[in-house]
Image (tube, coloured by chain):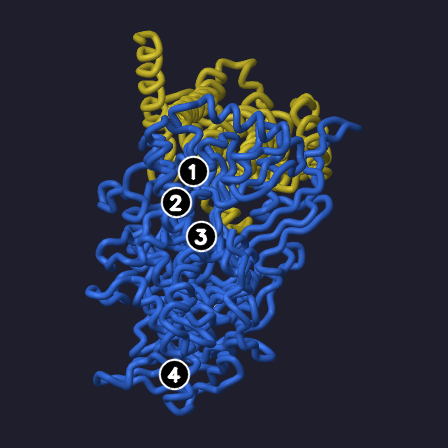
Chain colours: A blue, B yellow
Amino acid sequence: MATDRLGDRHQAAGPILEVTDLRVTYDAGATPVQALRGVTLCVGTGDAVGVVGESGSGKTTLALSTLRLLPGEAAISGSVRLGGQELVGAPAEVVRRHRGRTAAYVLQAPGRGFNPVRTIGSQIAEPMRLHLDVSKPDARDRTARLARLVELDPDLLESYAHELSGGERQRAMLAMALACDPPLLILDEPTSGLDSTTKAAIAETLGRLRQEQGLALLVISHDFSLMADLTDDLAVLYGGVVVEQGPTRTVLTDPRHPYSRDLLGAYPSMTTQKDLRGIRGSAPDPADPPTGCPYHPRCTQAIDECATWAPELSPVAGRRIACLRGGVLTRLAAKNLTKSYRTGLRRTVDALRGVSLEVREGEVVGIVGETGSGKSTLVRLLVGVDEADAGTVEWEGRTLATFEKAEWADFRRRVAIVFQDPFEAVSPLLSVAEVVREPLDVQHIGSGSDRAQQVAAALAGVGLPPTDAFRSRRAHDLSGGQLQRVAIARALVLGPRLLLADEPTSMLDASEQAKLLVMLKDEQLARGMAMIVVSHDLALVRKVADRLVVLHAGEVVETGPGAEVIAAPSHPVTRALVKAAATLGTR
Amino acid sequence: MSRPRRLRRATRTLTILGGVTLAVFGVLALFGSALAPFDAGERAGRPFLEPSRDHLLGTDDIGHDILSELIGGARVSLLIGLAAAAIAVVGGGLLGAVAGYRRGAVDAVLMRTVDYALVVPTIPLLIVLASYLERGMRSQILVVAVLLWAEPARIVRSQVLSLRERTHVLAARTFGAGAPYLIRRHVVPAVAPLLIAQFVRVVSVAILFEVALSFVGLGDPVRRSWGSMIQFATDRGAFLTGAWKWWIVPPGLCVAAVVCSFAFVGLGLEERFDRRLARGAQG
Ligand code: SF4
């Protein structure tokens, strides 16, 4: 195929694009809108850098500022160096000289960039006639070559924009952008509005162009899969600042900023089996951006400082993130847990043999194993009602074994557990209200009427009537499903940051199981808490778990993202579990 | 269905009967001095009088009115029984709770002691203790309590042992409940009905033991219980004269009535508690 370069382009030493502490404020309405609040970004020769964010994050402003295409009312400060030339404060004709030649901008919404009454071909040729001073036949020749380069049928060059499909128009746009052979393409949502096959084809073309032409790309999009296909480096933009920046793979497979994690979670992907989840709260208002960390009103792990201190990007696990707490917290970590029980005078049984696992904020980890795999022992160790023979359990980095009294009380408030059999887990002597109120009583939280209110709220939260009549019923007079909900309300009443559910649905019938699981998942999402679901039933766990840990004979035999583990189980035990789950069919 | 129901109805009747009887004796014990025709310590007439209008149950060897003594004895007997049972049940219960809660060596030691306490023959032990201790109410209470603590201890221990493994107690621990809360909220309410039933049972046995104790000479020489009445009467040869009919039989009957009544009430309580347990278990 056409591997010909379009000619020797003028190469500047150093990065093509260097954005430093860029701030852009639109001063149009009554209140100035701060679209960018200090963004630093660098694109070197041949690099492909992505900027991902939701609408309102400032990503389009960023794209436009790189060529100073911003409307007049935008006040810009900081520095944008394109091909070594500072654009901020530069005279208009200097800026114009770089447009199309050092960097070309590929507009969002293909089609809008074309004049409907001129042929595509003449429009592609226009920039080179403007900038490069080439003759008409040369230009026609070059246009044909460009068309081939972007895989656009050269016959279409004689057509008008409305005669082209969306994909073809986008290719024509690309050809036009490439007309003056710029070393950098700025692509703003290059595939939005295209169907997925066209999208993939365009992405492929772009990838090829980058390879063959040594093109650098700055891709602005909200589309993670495009980023994965096209870019090597990724910056996540939120509220006008970069919150996470690093190698695309690293960021996408293991996002560490709470926002990136939540945004990825909200993104529909072929590799997740879970439902789409939105991020609680709403995007910040650029006219009145939050103080401190821009994400703090929506962040589930925010602390008081987050509202006052603006975090700076700093390196964490192979990328840089801006978070005062060092990114997504590891709530609970178990390291090398070993535990054996005496069964006779001399005999002992190894319940756990060196089990390690981690649960991060907002994450759902499924622990799957058959009876006797050590699940129950592990649960007891994780919630700190039993001690390991060796190994440690850490809560937010502090070892349980070294806890002081106050730390224990705090831990007890933050980690809750739902047991398998609600009739066992709830005292037969108590009423519904007494059961749900118990944690508040134990922790001495609130006055009597506060507690009554919280109980009512907790009951309503799990879909039970918060009426007086219901609350005064004896807990054991309820049905299994209802009582399990009561037990869940009790577990949630203290607002835990980690919920451990030990076979939470195994005593219920199939329809109740599904309902209860959906409810648990909803609660988990709404509260952004971490959750561990322990079960023998892989079919059930995979519905809710982000990550799976397969336990067998007291050891972790497999662990990984839920979908991967199920799609390609590597250990025989996992394979057996997957098979067993599959044959259950209906669930 | 009908057999258990008939049984239950019989138990109910017995329980009510026992309750009424106990109420009567309770009134006698509380207000005896006002109800009795004479002061129990006063020489009301000539010694060894047979029953008459003035002395419905005659007089004893000193001339005390036997009916008045009988009424006064209610207070002493009941007091000894209740006090001894309270000590046995509370003390035994605490020991059982500790054994069940601490487990391990503490449990082993305490429970071996319980085993011995349960198998040591009572009467010889009574006699041995009697020869070492001073006569009087305090000794009696102490001895009876020592004889009866083991059973409550055993019951409470097994309850606590099973409770501490129950998931709802584990659940309470996971949201931060410590031992005081667990005992107050989960152990005591679960064990209390059992202990109350135990208490009632132990009272009846304690009253019986009191008689035995008095008989072997540990009775209080001043404040006469029914047991010491019988002992005195026997000493003064009541069986040789016809006097046993009014001197020994009435206190004997009183003891029997009170012991049976306590047993009946205990039975009723246990039955009720069992029903509650069964309901709890089936959910
Ligand atoms: S923890 Fe604080 S700094 Fe980190 S993302 Fe949340 S709100 Fe921002």
Ligand 1 closer than 8 Å to label 3 CB:
no
Q: Which mark is residue A225?
A: 3
Front in this rendered view, residue B32 or B165: B165
Q: CA distance from mark 4 to mark 1?
A: 54 Å
3 vs 4, front mark: 4
Circle 2 sits in a helix, a strand or a loop, which is it? helix
**Chain name for mark 3:** A
1 vs 3, front mark: 3
* Residue in view at x 39 percent, y 28 percent: A587
Sequence-first tag of 3 and 4: 4
Circle 1 sits in a helix, a strand or a loop, which is it? loop
- Residue A177, x across and y down, in percent: 39, 68
Sequence-first tag of 2 and 1: 2
| Amino acid type, callout 2 | Lys
Circle 4 sits in a helix, a strand or a loop, which is it? helix
Q: CA distance from mark 2 to mark 3?
A: 25 Å
Label 1 sits on residue: A543
Position above or below: A485 against A370: below
